[in-house]
Amino acid sequence: MKLTTLLAASIAFIPAVAMAEEKGKVEGIHHWVSESEVNALKVITDKLATKGYIWQDSAVGGLSGANALQALRTRLAAGNPPTTMQFLGYEGLDWAKEGVLRSLNDLYVKNGWDKALAPQLLAFVKSDDDYISLPINMHRQNWVWANKAVFDKAGLAEPKSWDELIAAGPKLKEAGVIPLAIGDEPWQILEVFEAILVDVNGPDFYEKAVIDLDEGALSSEQMVDAFDKLRQVRGLVDDGFTGRDWAVATGMVASGKAAMQVMGDWAKGEFLAKGMKPGVDFLCFPTPTATPNYKFVIDAFGVFKSDDPVVVAGQDAWAESIMDPEVQTNFNKIKGSIPARSDVPVDDFDDCAKRSFADREAAVAGGAMLGGLTEGFAAQPQFSGVYSDVVAKFFVTDMSSKDAVQSLVDGINNAR
Amino acid sequence: MNTEANSARRSHLLGRLFIYGSLLALAAFYLMPLWVMIVTSLKSLDEIYAGSFVGLPKAITFEAWEKAWGQACIGTACDGLRPYFINSLLMVIPAVILSTGIGAINGYILTKWRFPGSNFFFGMLLFGCFLPFQAVILPMAQLLGSLRLSGTIPGLVLVHTVYGISFTTLFFRNYFITIPDELTRAAQIDGAGFFRIFFSVMLPAALPIIVVSCIWQFTQIWNDFLFGVSFTAGQSSPITVALNNIVNVTMGRKQYNVDMAAAMIAAIPTLVVYIVAGRYFVRGLTAGAVKG
Amino acid sequence: MRSTLSMRDRLTHWLPRLVLSPSLVAVFIGVYLFIAWTGWISLSSSKMVPKYDFVGLEQYIRLWATPRWETAVVNLFLFTVLFLAITIAIGLLIAILLDQRVRAEGFLRAVYLYPMALSFIVTGTAWKWILNPDLGVEKVVNDLGWSGFVFDWITRPDTAIYCVVIAAVWQSTGFAMAIFLAGLRGIDTSIIKAAQIEGAGLPRIYMSIIVPMLRPAFLSVIVLLSYISIKSFDLVLALTNAGPGNATEMPSTFMFSATFRRNQMGVGAASAMMMLMTVAAIIVPYLYSELRESRNEH
């Protein structure tokens, strides 16, 4: 008897789900599930609510967004796309090529958003002639986060080159501090490697080897040098780095157990959450180089084609919420990044963000704005995947630099 | 004479000591992760970050359990695991009943109403037990979409029933094969038809294997992650997907105690089923899964 | 009179097939048709979304030229062999020990069985801490005074796969034990008594008489454990996330990342087909012999 009731209840669920498609709702798939990420997202959805739309959350966390992408794929296959979806790297462009994304040209022109964005960023929100996504922020990837007390005690200053940074290792070890905190996840290792790649060899080399995937650059001596540097960096890391979450590594720097971490500016939120102040308790500086550069990562939302005027109106409201200057400011103060719009006042951001703003301007002027490889802004995923495979294997085994370069070349050619 | 009896007793005692010693050592090994999970879920976050993962909590707090059940945030929805727990119940109960029922009648046909080719069909069904499910996700999504079941719990019920049939049929077929054909033949001579024999002769005899089938299906479906994450989103997700969202925080300070409490909550239904029906489990296996 | 009888006969003749057919249709579509679809995709140039063209074996060639796939294949082989061997050995040992009329058997059985009730996503997280040298077993033993004790398998690419084996064994031993115990309970005890009277010791009785009698139980255990081993997707993700580096990559995780993370759906489908073929090579002969045996019995 009870079983039939339950059966009936589960069938009665169909209308309940169908009702979710009702008026006035904006459904979004995203992979922001941590507290600070969610708080940042709330800034946008609160704005959306003032426009009279309800946010329906379809968060799918984990696996660097792969779960969310899988969910999207099956939803599209089933002919039931969400209203909007968070994109990293080429994802948005790839989906635009499949013809499932709505062109946002009308909104961009009407609101002048096209003029508010840096040109390097446009490459990821514009597919051919169509604007296809709405960038909310810009993270900088090539940061070093350091514990100030540890640096002062060891008499260290901001290093000017990777050699200097590596040379600080023995001193820090003597003081009983782990020089560099990192986890063994391939993406964490790749963040370090791609920083070395451009810092040591310059932005032009990075463009050739990573963005153009030029075989000559891939197999060059400079590539071997970069791997040699990474091998030296391996010496700065403790043995317990397996399975270490990046935030745990950040915590090690915050507590003084480790001296430095190479990580994007999402790490900043971790320090701030502990009540630490930039410049006072912790230091932020770009990865050391003679050729300053700015590695960016953008979070952007695309919206899916729909014939339903109610859905389209909801998308308009969603787009205006994301691109609202005030929303961009408040969102990024929580998330640790800086606004995607370059016309937003920066006065009340902290020192790290201000440095990020200044460096961005310099990099835009100097042609040193580069897409981050790890998060998919430099190469298509099948190629960045080869990079992360090789670099991760190199880092955890005693592979030689020559072998690493060889398997990098073979892997890239195989994936072409 | 006396010493011989003594040494026999001593060797018997040593044997017992060995048996109990090994069994208890193994039991400790098997309980260790559960211990870690329970202990961690009862600690405050500060105590965990202060160092000890394994030791007893200094002060027991159910904060993490309350948070995991009612407040933990998944995306911007801060309802904890409760709604997803209910989703999983609404999914698992119909799916277990359907797949076990279908498996029972399939097993009955494949043993008592055999026809040319029925063994071949059984082989075809069985291969479904060993399917790597990733291979069928995309076509399945297309099918669910055209059935208008995409993103719904009935859709998940359908998927779990289809892929559960193979195993339940195997269970029932191997069990029913041990019931003598004379029994069904006698019932047939008495005038009982296809369904009457099934309901009044076969099913009453099949209780142990029904329990086995239900336990197996319940565990598989409750713990499923891949189908859940692929075919549902947001509010209609099963508990494993919600658990993954809580545990796999991509950025931010890990709340280990909430993770562990959430994992425990997700594990409790299947744990209870095992504890209550563990005895049937072994008895059922004796009758069905082991051939011969 | 005669015609109704034949009606009934005809109904009796067709009814079983009729009742069975929905299951067959469901499985035909859900398993075979979908496999065919995946097979087709593996021969196409599909990248991000399915594309229905034909490029021959290109994706398979690409697959076998990928070092990560080789790692995955070697790992699956290593994992399956170790997982099956250890699980069967410990499961059999526990079953035999429990069969010695011990006290609190029900409780102990429940203890060995409960891991089967937990999702890999749950157990992987707990094991991750236990195996971590900074948090788990190594630290506890060190704190107890044995400072030289090292247990850092999970941090080393050449040994991390054994950690996956340990967690998988932990999860599944209870299942093997239950089946063996059932097999043992089905054996006539007079055989043991007869052998004892002839002077054979218990270990020898088990080794040379009882264990060979458990052949059917062994087969069931091997089949069910192979299934679990192929499914070892969630465990690897939760325990090592295929790391350190990609050292614990398995075909199932490879397939997932190729298809969903790297826009290589064709390669993913090819790897799924390789997994399927491997499974078929093991399972089909087993099913065939099982079905033949049962046909001979009746």
Image (spheres, helix red, strand yellow):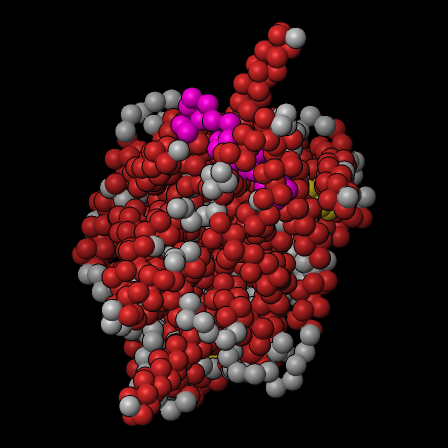
Of helix, strand and loop, which mostly describes the magenta segment? helix
Asked if the magenta segment contains residue B30, the reply would be no
Residue B134, quarter of the rendered image: top left
Q: Nearer the viewer, residue C188 or B260?
A: C188
On screen, residue B244 versus residue A408, left or right, reads right
Q: Nearer the viewer, residue C7 or A65?
A: C7
On screen, residue B157 versus residue A51, left or right, reads left
Q: Position of residue B233 (x, y in %)?
A: 63, 44
Placement of A395 over or under A7, stated as above or below:
below
Q: Nearer the viewer, residue B99 or A296?
A: B99
Q: Is residue A277 visible?
A: no
At horizontal 44% and vertical 26% (from top left) the residue drawn is B118
On screen, residue B157 versus residue C271, left or right, reads right
Q: Position of residue C223 (x, y in %)?
A: 37, 47
Placement of A378 over or under C235, stated as above or below:
above
At horizontal 58% and vertical 68% (from top left) the residue drawn is B260
Q: Position of residue C11 (x, y in %)?
A: 59, 17
Asked if the magenta segment contains residue B97, the reply would be yes
Q: Position of residue B164 (x, y in %)?
A: 53, 40
Placement of B165 over or under C236, stated as above or below:
above
Q: Nearer the viewer, residue C272 or B23?
A: B23
Q: Which residues are magenta?
A: B96-120
At horizontal 42% and vertical 67% (from top left) the residue drawn is C99
Residue C19, quarter of the rendered image: top right
Residue A262, quarter of the rendered image: bottom left
At horizontal 80% and vertical 48% (from top left) the residue drawn is A50
> Which quadrant is home to the N terminus of chain B?
bottom left
